[in-house]
Structure formats: C-alpha cells, structure tokens
Amino acid sequence: MNILIADLDKGFTKEIEQAWTVPDVELFFCNSEDNLMPLVKKTPVDLAFIEVPFLTIDNMDMVSFLKEKNPGTEIFVLCDSKNWPGATSAINRGANSFIMKPVSVTQMEETVKKFQAQQQNKSTHQLMESQVLNSLLGDTPEMRKILKTVQKIAPTTSTVLITGESGSGKEFLANVVHRYSKRKDAPFVAVNCGAIPENLVESELFGAKKGSYTGSTADKKGLFESANGGTLFLDEVGELSPATQVKLLRFLQSREIRRVGETEARYLDVRIIAATNRDLQAAMLQGKFREDLYYRLNTFHLHLPALRERRAVIPTLVRYFILKNKEAHGKDIVDLEPQAQYALSKYPYPGNIRELENIIEHAIVLSENGIIRLEDLPENVQEEAKEKTMAIPHIKGSGTAAEETAKVEYAPAETTASLVSSSIVSPATDEPSDEILSLDEMERRHILHALSLCKGNRSEVCKKLGISRATLWRKLKELKIQMDGEEE
C-alpha cells in the first residue's frame, strides 16, 4: 500500500517517518507544492493525507486528479481552524473526510488500519464473488458467451434487459454488471416492481411531494434518486402499470424524473438494468407492455438458462450455500452423504438457484453431527432421488446401487456422475463393463431391460422399479423410449 503525506511542516512529516509502526506500507512525503505533481504522476497512491494548501496545484484540483488516476484512492484532508472551509470543499469533490490538526501519528495509523481492513474485506468479497460468478454461470458455451458480453457492456452506461425463470440469478447477474462498471462504488438499488402496491409504485420509484397523496406527511425521495450515480435494478419490470411505463420511458429518453405532485424536473445519472421472467414480446402483442419501452430496455439482452440446464454448477453452488448458511444456524457442516449429493444433482429445481439455497438451508437445520443426509432434504427432493436410484443398474457386490453408492467417499469437487464408477454391470449380461455411461443412458438401458423382462407390461415394470405409472410415462418421454403402437 502506498501512502502519500503532503504537508508543509517538515517537522511533522519527520516525526511521522520516525514513529510509524504500521507494516506493509510505503510512505511518500512531500513538503513542497512544486514537488507534489511530479510525485503523484509517477507513484500510484492508495491513501493520501493532504494539507489544504496542496489541494490545488497549477490550477489542477488534486482530489480530482488522484481519483481519476486511481478511483479507489482514499483522501483525507489535513486542516486547521483557519482553512477548514477548503477541506469541506474538497469533500464535496470526492475527498473522504478531513482531520483537524494537530494530529498524532497514532490517529493517522488508526485511519490506515481501518483502510487496510476495508481493502482486505473488499478483496475477500471480490474473490468470493468471482467464485460464485463462475458457479452461477457454469462452463458451457452459452454461459461463457454471457460472461464475455457482461465484461464488454459493464463499463458502459447502456441499459440491460435480463430474462430467465424466477430464481435463476437475474439480480445476481445485474449486481455483477454493476460491480464490473465504473459505478461500482456508487449505490446498487434493487426493487421488485411486482411487490409494490399499484397505488404506491410511482411514489416509491420517483418520489413524492408532501401532501401529494393521503398519508404523505413529508417530501419523499424515490428509488431513482437513491440510485443516483449508480445502478437501479428493476426486477419484474413487466409488472409495471401503463402509466409507470410512460414515466420510465421518459426517464430513459431524457434522464429526468418528476416527483409525484411536483412540476420541477430532476436530472439523474442512473443506469437501468431491468429483468423479467415474463415474455415481454407476447405482452407487447397483448397491449400490456409498451413497444417503445421494450426497445429502450433491450439495448443488451442477457438470458439466463434454468439451473436444470446447467447442472454442472450444482456441486459448487451446494458448497457455497453450505458455507453461507451454516454459521447462521450454528451448524458446522463437514460432509454431505453421497445419496444426498445424488439427490441434489437429479432434482429438476423448478425454483432454480433460489430453491436450491432454500433446500440447503432446510438440510442444514435438520442435519446431525455435521453431516447432511438424504433424509435431511425436503421430501420432494428425496422422492426424485429414490426414483432415479431405482433405475440404476446394480453395482458389482451384494448391495443395491444405492447401498453401494453410499459407500463412495463424497468428493466436493466432483460431479455426481463420478459416484458411479467403471464397475457398472451390464443389465443384459450381468458381466462387468469398462464403459462409463452417463446416468441418463444407464437409466434408459435399465428401463429397456425391465420392459423386456416384463414383456412390456407397464404395471409390472412400475412395481419392479418401485415407481408410479406417471413417473414411468415421464421417463419414457424424457429418454425417448418408444413403445409398440406409439408414434414418434
């Protein structure tokens, strides 16, 4: 960390140099206004203590110069009772705060320690965010394309429309766009448009003047103003009323809003990211969503596939949600039984990532001895696993596939396909095979084998496999197994 200390008092800077104790920093001192600009041009500055006389050099605003060179620079202005108005002006231009002189070395060191802690937390958060981003997106061509697009559009001010099923991670992706942008230090304000009562939507979004509606006892700042300088995330934008759609369109065209009950326009610098799980094009044809607003929002379109379409990310997301939720419930989760892992890998997740997190929280609460078992999962997740497990060929040995699978050590970094090893036995020959099949292919072959043994009697097949007729019918459709007398 590079720390700049610019002060006319050489005795003060000498005292700091001799008494400084905070490790892992490099101090740069400047006692002359003429030397400051050459110093900061060649030296990146992470934190600066600058006395008021150094704030303007050769008609250059030093606060703005340092912030432009390194947006993360924190600036503290050193001032006294005579020149503190200059410090106040610097804060308006982006300085963090001012410190009244005389100031001790200990005070300055405490300021640096707080900054170091903030940087460490930010670094940890960015690392976790990067890991979760990879987990959310998954290593598929479609998701890599989304990430590449995000990296290109994030630094711009362009409007983005994110679509996808409920719970698929739209708000998270919007937050990623914000954090990759130049607005990352400004507010990210998220609002669910469908969750606000219709009669309050306009005042919540755009604000309201005192007395403009019943119960309005004071001027109200809306969410647009709260997001000024940053990003406003409008989730479920398709739920907005026609009147509110007009106001949103006006803002996108002019960057101005009017509070309810006011005639004065307010200019705001807000980036809009909208999201919906509805088909906006169908809504346009039905007259429920404005066509001109749709094209304004749809400058860039990101579509998130459902979780069931990117199953490879499930093990990593499971680990992340365990880490995220275990401390809140006072549980130290150290293991996940293979049967539970298998169940989590095969469940279809109609509620997507949000449902997965709820499932993991449910399992953590019910877990015992730091282990998540199959019975700790919700019943609907268990049932899916039981049906799937019954359709797996027997593994060489005396137990059932489920029993043998349970003996396999859980490896968090592996996908659930690795739970079934190359010791799979061919259902037709009962001889070991070196071929490693996908779970779906094994399931398909086993059902075909059962149908053959039961001479096509579906009721008998269901009884042998321990599944319902509805489940068997669904399996036949999913695995493209055609029965006699059926059409393609």
Image (tube, rainbow, N blue to C red):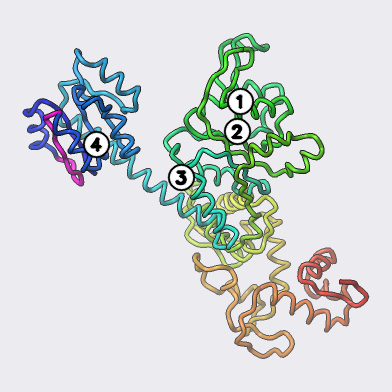
Q: Nearer the viewer, mark 3 or mark 4?
A: 3
| Residue range corresponding to the magenta coloring | 21-33
Q: Are marks 1 and 2 in contact (CB under 8 Å)?
A: yes
* 3D distance between C-alphas at marks 3 and 2: 20 Å
* 3D distance between C-alphas at marks 4 and 1: 39 Å
Callout 3, which amino acid? Tyr
- The earlier-in-sequence mark between 3 and 4 is 4
User: At 69% from the left edge and 86% from the top edge, which residue is drawn?
Assistant: 426
Q: Position of residue 130 (x, y in %)?
A: 45, 52
* 3D distance between C-alphas at marks 1 and 2: 9 Å
Q: Is 349 within the magenta? A: no
Callout 2, which amino acid? Val
User: At 82% from the left edge and 38% from the top edge, which residue is drawn?
Assistant: 286
Q: Are marks 3 and 1 in contact (CB under 8 Å)?
A: no
Q: Position of residue 174 (x, y in %)?
A: 55, 43
Which residue is label 1 attached to?
205
Give the tally of numbered discs. Answer: 4
Image quadrant where one finds the N terminus: top left
Which residue is label 4 attached to?
112
Out of 272 and 130, give the one closest to the viewer.
272
In the rendered view, does 481 fall on the left or right side of 308? right
Out of 279 and 309, give the one closest to the viewer.
279
Callout 4, which amino acid? Val
